[in-house]
Image (cartoon, rainbow, N blue to C red):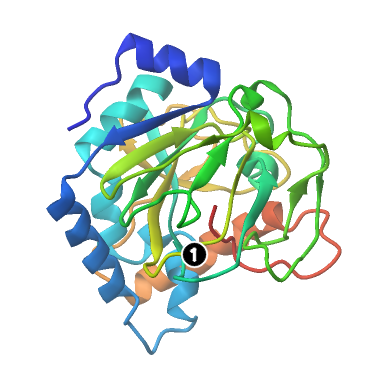
Amino acid sequence: MAASLSKEQVEAYRRDGYLCPITIFDADEARSHREAFERMEQVSGLPRPISEYTRVNAHLVAEAPRRVAGTKAILDAVESILGPDLLLWGVEYFVKEAQTDKIVSWHQDITYWGMGETDHEVTAWVALSPANAASGCMRFVPGSHKSSIVDHNDTFSDDNLLSRGQEIAVEVDEADAITAALEPGQMSLHHGRLFHASGPNVTDDRRIGCVMRFIRPDTPVTGHDRDYAVVMRGCDRSRNRISMVPPEGDFTQEALALYEEVLAAQAVALTEGAEQNVGSYEPA
């Protein structure tokens, strides 16, 4: 299983803006985490549809995503890139249902996160089911993270799974892209400015990923007053964000209240400049 990255792996990440595949769980462990997620999907009677809790900040309301995010091999790999002080900014389950024509257009994640041009973040994407070309895995443009945040157009297209249907307003040469295929239990790491997209899932299985956003404590907060994070390793000397400890258990009243507080703050950045309502963040 993965531990701290080698010097060569870190250099590859800094050069290309991504690294994959990295094995985190064996097949049985990956299946167990998938089953925990799918049990979570069956919870009802909540203030919001369960899909909203699984798509955005799932770690605030349930133990299953917190168990994935706290995996030592994941934290070791991320520490190799960001250093010993690690904050968890978000955890989401990204699902493309079987036989869907939904796609994700070329975009840069960090565009609407309210962090500016920072390099002090990394996304860890762990496959809980096969993520390959047929199921709509991610595609990356190597080295594109070295550019600034480019302009994006909001399409609000019905077949685009992004919250604003946002797509990069510059032409992307598909020939430059690589396919980031992952087996269940494998992980990719990618930079928030990396150009990436994904196609439809034409298989008979769901494409499920547990996706964690890690940042350094000194990652800036831009465009709004409040942001939140969980200290996973080391300490937060910068105090740029409100440090929180999610309540234990699943969907407690305290957790649901914290979820609403954090979501309201993050929505300020997510919706900035949009000309119509913006829905929940959707999968890559």
Q: Secondary structure at mark 1?
A: loop
Where residue 77 sits: x, y (%)? 31, 28
User: Pointer 1: residues within 10 angstroms few (<14), some, or many (20+)?
Assistant: some
* Residue found 30% across the figure and 42% down from its top: 186
* Residue found 49% across the figure and 64% down from its top: 202
Residue to which mark 1 is pinned: 202
* Residue found 22% across the figure and 30% down from its top: 2
**Could you tell whether 55 is left or right of 170 in the image?**
left
Q: Is residue 84 visible?
A: no
Residue type highlighted by circle 1: Val
Where residue 280 sits: x, y (%)? 60, 66
Where residue 7 sits: x, y (%)? 34, 10
Seen from the viewer's position, the closer of residues 270 and 169 is 169
User: Looking at the rendering, which quadrant does residue 181 occupy?
Assistant: top left
Q: Is residue 140 visible?
A: yes
Q: Is residue 56 above or below residue 118?
A: below
Quadrant containing the N terminus is top left
